[in-house]
Image (cartoon, grey):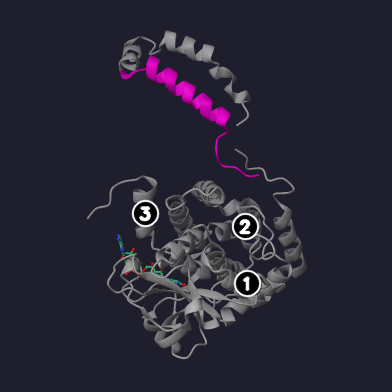
Amino acid sequence: MNFQPDEEDNLYRDKLRAIAAEYGWQEMRALRDEAEELHLERFSFEFQNRLGREGLIGLTWPAPYGKGARVDQQFLMAEELECQGFPGYGLTSIQRGGGMLLRSGSEEQIAEHLPHVADGSWVYCQGLSEPGAGSDLLSLRTRAVREGDEYVINGSKLWTSTAHHANWCSLLVRTDPEQSRHKGLSLLLVDLKSPGVTMQPVWVLGGWHVNAVFYDNVRVPAKNLVGQENQGWKVITGNLDEERAMSFGGTETRLLCARLIHRLQERADTLGESDLERLGHFIMELEADRLLYLRVGLQAARGEDTSGSGPMSKVYGSELAQQFVEWAAELLGRETLYQESEDVLANDLEQQVRVATVLTVIGGTSEVQRNIVATRYLGLPRSN
Amino acid sequence: MLDERWTPEVEEIGDALRRILSAESSPEQVRKAEAEENGRDAALEQTLAEFGLGDLRRVDI
Ligand SMILES: Cc1cc2nc3c(=O)[nH]c(=O)nc-3n(C[C@H](O)[C@H](O)[C@H](O)COP(=O)(O)OP(=O)(O)OC[C@H]3O[C@@H](n4cnc5c(N)ncnc54)[C@H](O)[C@@H]3O)c2cc1C
């Protein structure tokens, strides 16, 4: 057991720390504003490109695209990024696109896409959920039919994050209508500028928008099939594992908690025993969240199954984020939530009340994650 | 490198302790000890002391 990172473990964390120091508070806030202006979740193109130039995208990928870094080195870097308040979602979403290709893509796909992922110039989104196929993803109905060297896609996806600024969508479609559930699905890389792709914004509580994306006779070259035809589920489960290995709110909450403690120092004498008891409780829970989150990454690095521990970390972190921010807003005064104010911390807490709610749905709802913990982690039988 | 797992040495200690307790601290033995005035099981305490339970703090986890 070792929770004490050494100099080598901290190599990329320290690199990120040095970049962060260059930005300073105002510039870092400007990156967050960029996400808001673009209606994106925690995403800054400027910062993304900077990370690309510094070689910090896809750290664990083999050369020439990545640095062959260890997962714990990447974990510490990503943690630093969020702890410093930088937008982290962009990095994880494009890395997911690159990771998928390295796991399942053809040599040509890797050669075409990876350089653009690694330098931060191409953005990827994930088109899985549909109206009526969210938790029950396997009932999805978007179809792709092979016609010569192309697939023709018809259907619609809902909740596609980042699609309005993405170059590519990893689209899960049904290619064999005779088969059901996880059989007969395929994964296609779709250029979002293709004729027949249209989008509508769907605003979410957090303040950004996701998208309803419609595919109307969209033609995609057959070479954009990732993995084998009808084996798309195998491809996408890797993405889902990677998604659940993200920090869903816990790391951001640690930063908010630290900022709140600084604020409370000014008025420590007004705090009661129960406030201090709650604060102590959250500090412990945030520590537990960090260990759950770290465990998923380390297990994945060893090639172990994370299908039970990933959801455990996800549900714990997102619900903790929600509980913390509600308490913090209460402590600073309920009006924090309703008034426009110059107070940056109050505004961030108000935003986080909304964001944290979204985090319990995005990537799979808490109810569904709990079901997965029961079946995959505890090995309990499924109810029929 | 960060590692959230117990070392093999710690796992070994856990396994050995589990073996002792399942042999020498069965539910019947626990009930018997509870029925004693001081609630203690001198034989078990002796075995655990010989096992080196008191020295465990020094093990590198
Ligand atoms: C902000 C945001 C971004 C997202 N980004 C993406 C994206 O980029 N790409 C993408 O493909 N998807 C995305 N999603 C979709 C997300 O994965 C789904 O919203 C989620 O899986 C839930 O599906 P649903 O919305 O259809 O709700 P439903 O599945 O209809 O669920 C409705 C309610 O029923 C409960 N429920 C459903 N099934 C069960 C069950 N078996 N047991 C107990 N309770 C159950 C749920 O917990 C929930 O409370 C995003 C969602 C949000 C909110």
A49 left or right of B48 in image: right
Q: Which residue lies furthest to the left in this view?
A: A384
Q: Mark 2 points at which residue?
A: A79
Q: In which quarter of the image is the C terminus of chain A?
A: bottom left
A125 left or right of A172 in image: right
Foreground disc of the pair 1, 2: 1
Q: Mark 3 points at which residue?
A: A372
Position in image of residue A130 (x %, y %): 36, 75
Q: How far apart are marks 3 and 2 (CA)?
A: 25 Å
- Above or below, A87 against B49 in this view is below
Amino acid carrying label 2: it is: Glu
Task: Please report the bounds of the magenta region as a residue range.
Answer: B1-27
Q: How many labels does the image show?
A: 3
Position in image of residue A176 (x %, y %): 33, 73
Residue contact at pointers 3 and 2, CB within 8 angstroms: no
Q: Distance between the residues labelled 1 and 2?
A: 29 Å
- Above or below, A288 against A106 in this view is above
Position in image of residue A40 (x %, y %): 54, 77
For the stretch drawn in magenta, the main secondary structure is: helix
Looking at the rendered structure, which numbered label has been put on residue A111?
Answer: 1
Residue at x-position 53% and y-position 59%: A246
Amino acid carrying label 1: it is: Ala
A94 left or right of A211 in image: right
A169 in the magenta segment? no
Looking at the image, is mark 1 or mark 3 earlier in the sequence? Answer: 1
Q: How far apart are marks 1 and 3 (CA)?
A: 36 Å
